[in-house]
Image (cartoon, rainbow, N blue to C red):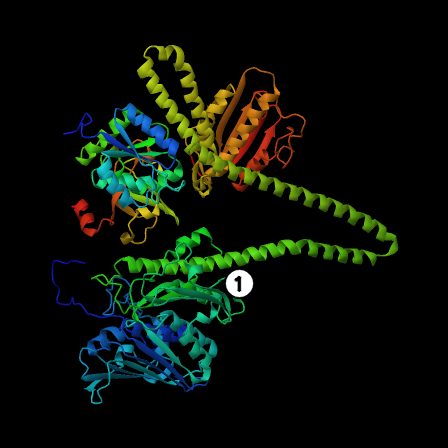
Amino acid sequence: MSTMVLPSRIQRVAVIDDDKQARDAMAESIEDANLQPVIQQDRLNSLADLIDKLKIDADAAICDHRLKPRNYAAFQGAEAVAQLYRIHFPALLITAWSTEDIDNIRPYRREIPVMIKSGGLEPRIIREGIIQCLNEFKNTYVKERQPWRVLLRIEDVDPSFIYIIVPSWDSNTGLRLPRSIIPIHLGDIKPGMRLFSEVNTGASKNEDLYFDHFEIAEEPGNSYADLIRS
Amino acid sequence: MSMGSTNPNDRVTPTNFRFSANILRRLGEELNPSPSRGLVELAKNAYDADALNCAIELRNVERPGGVITITDDGDGMDTQEIINGWLVLGKSEKIHRSKTRLSRQPSGDKGLGRLAALRMGTGVSMLSIPRESPGVEHSLLIEWERYTEEVLVEEIDLKIETRLNIEQKTPGTKITLENLRASVNRNEIQQLARGLILLADPFGNNPAGFEPILITPEYEDLERMVKAKYFNDAEFHLIAKVDERGFSEALVEDWRGETIYSAKHNDLRQREKSPYKCPVANFDLWVFILEPGVFSMRTASISEVRKWLNEFGGIYLYHNGLRVASYGDKGDDWLGLNLMRARSPELRPSTNTSVGRINMTDNERLLTQKTDRSGFIVNEAFQELQVFATDALNWMARRRLDEREKKRRATRSEAPIKSAKEKTTVKQAISTVPEEQRQKVQKAFAKYDRARESEVSELRKEVQLYRTLGTIGITSAVFAHESANNPLKLVAQSIRTVQHRCRTYLAGKYDEYLKDPIERIFRSVDSLRVLADVTLSLVDHEKRRASKVDIHKVIKGIIELYTPFITDRDVVITLELSEGNPYLRGSVAAIESITSNLLNNSLIAFERKPPGERKIVIRTKIVDNELELRVLDNGPGIEGIDKNDIWLPGQTTRPNGTGLGLTIVRDAVTDLGGRVDAVEKGELGGAEIIISLLILGA
């Protein structure tokens, strides 16, 4: 059953951003959502420390993606939100949505239910975002986040990126994924290969697509060829 | 013919083709004038029989009467295999053959080359001891003088003699070509040597590897060549190692064996200086530069080394002395050499230009092989080994890049000195010209010199201008990034809160007093964001990659980016695009810079005209295999400058203009193989720029 209203156990929302003023601005928005901001003022030495702290101090979190420039944390916001997802701790990610951000968030995107453009935080978005996280923890997805197992085709490969087409999403648009998203055990990835992956093909924008559970899709063998002939 | 009744005179006589024994000479010597190829085929038979060693010995072959023996330690043959295999000529079993006991892909050559080799002498003797039944040996003698024109092939009986293997010889096959009819020259032995190198495992210590040796006392250098292969012809030899504590060092030797670069651990491991958590490893890589100029000094030819590298190039992995498949096999680029090369083709080795090995001594068993023996489980130690090897490769690439830069700088500083020297030479030459013509020549030269000087000075200015623009570009990208991420985000976030609170606490008063100014702030933030986005989108590295570019899509994208400026300047843009989606191979950046520079030009031109309607039309039309792109406006047109000069760098009618916009357009179009043209006052009354681009389709 999907949750429609924010449960009362969610009260304290942690604010994680490397810019003090931005933390304050986010806190104001949280207050306006009738929730209680818990500002993380101190430097965050490790992700594990942060998570331990959040488990005690907060019920949800809003986290900016870029935490490194101002000497605030040793990890990126996307990593933090994805880790929190695994322990079913609702967290929203804020990002400027530059090409670079999209690339380095992509490997974590499966575990980031809600991304909000910098400066776009609103009380309504906070409450709805947390509800969406809670629903995903119960495997109830909105249409844009529902995972589907699909075939994708490798178009090109360079040292940093692979270029793919997901025909069941849009057969005319090439997509770029960081190479690191493909697990090493799959070996050498070459143009022309096909892979299986879990993808939310209901997403309308490229930056909302996630890719998970890659597998090499073998060429149909003789038995398959026999089957279609018979 | 009736099939229904039987006549007592009807009968069927079976028959078949029969061959004059002479056919063997035709098929052997006459079709295969080079016996070396046949000898290589015999070595390939040994490979197919899973031999580890194969020796080809040539004795007294510099004149007729010599002897050649081919000895291998393969699986040998029983009588059936001799009859149905060895003695069958011209049957190729290349396809559909399964792998051998040692998982080799059989070459399956049973061709006529072998016949030519076997016929080199007046007789052949063959002795084979099968691995399956090593207690017996089979021998066969062929005397070619029995095969004369008068007899048919099948009339000549051959006898396989089977005896007990009393001396307990090891399995394998030995073929002796006796009493050679002709001498074998150096050229042929060299070809044989090359053929053998192509069969041999490059580094030896592979338990399943094939190790052919050549014994030819007359040509010891060729014997050595088979042993040494082509390693000595490499341009560079990278030697890197990780010791027991995980610390590394590396050096690069040139082809003479002299150290040209060396590195300590910290030079290799740039990011973190910690030790590598991998087993003790020695990494050797031989890098070849297969260019005629570089290679002419070497013993081998480029094509033979290229062939060899094509067969064996890559980095092999040895674990406690044993080769681990399939690292380094054809198609297994486990260190991503070819990908790294994609970035910098000149200075990076690929699997087609290098061959190497990593020898690991793994006493602590940090690495575990997968159960199917297809490689190692990718654990931390294995990843660290990959990091070490990649670090060493990156270091070598950096050193080579550094060297190339030094050379470039040296050439640049030498150029003026060289040029001054040449000038003096010319002046001296002129002084030898007869008196009456000398003055004329001197004058002409002085004129030429002045023209050249001014050209150089123009070029220098242009370089300076590009450099300045480059710096502006980098700086604005940084600012764009910063502003989008920080102050803009804060303004947007804060005004959103202000809006929310005003609505909540001031109720109806909000619309009356605050709605307009707050919405104005939102709109301004959006425009500023667009500015940042435009800048950042232009520097996206992706756009400089060569790929299939959908021209209409790029044009529409640029218009979308420009919409806030266009609206702000009260300009109406109309797109009149052709049917279909014309595309070419090029970079998105090229089409973007063409479109955006032309748009910039039109936007600026409107300022030179009194206020009124401002129109830009972007029109495309497909003409044969070209796309004609026109950008027209109703501005003042091309004035105060010749329409042919607008493309020249630095030519501008605006005091603060760079005069580079249209030059960039022209250069980008030329790079794509297209043409540019302009009309001073076009269809809309203003400038009309016409770009023709070769397209691949639509």
Asked whether the viewer can see residue B237, the reply is: no
Q: Is residue B300 left or right of residue B69?
A: right
Mark 1, chain letter?
Answer: B
Question: Taking B565 as reference, is A218 above or below it?
Answer: below
Q: Name the residue: 29% across, 35% down.
A: A169
Query: What count of labels does the image hold?
Result: 1
Q: Is residue A171 left or right of residue B592?
A: left
Observer-nearest residue: B225 or B415? B415
Q: What is the x, y in percent for residue B419?
A: 70, 54
Q: Name the residue: 43% across, 18% down.
A: B520
Q: Is residue A144 left or right of residue B494?
A: left
Secondary element under disc 1, as helix, strand or loop, is helix
Question: Taking A151 as reference, is B156 above or below it?
Answer: below
- Quadrant of residue B451 within the rendered picture: top right
Amino acid type indicated by mark 1: Pro
- Quadrant of residue A175 within the rendered picture: top left
Asked whether the viewer can see residue B427, the reply is: yes
Q: What is the x, y in percent for residue B266?
A: 43, 60
Question: Counting other residues with Cα less than 10 Å from the Cα at mark 1, is it few (<14), some (14-19), or many (20 or more)?
Answer: few
Question: Taking A96 as reference, is B126 above or below it?
Answer: below
Judging by the rendered image, the residue that carries numbered circle 1 is B292
Quadrant placement of the N terminus of chain A: top left
Observer-nearest residue: B504 or A209? B504
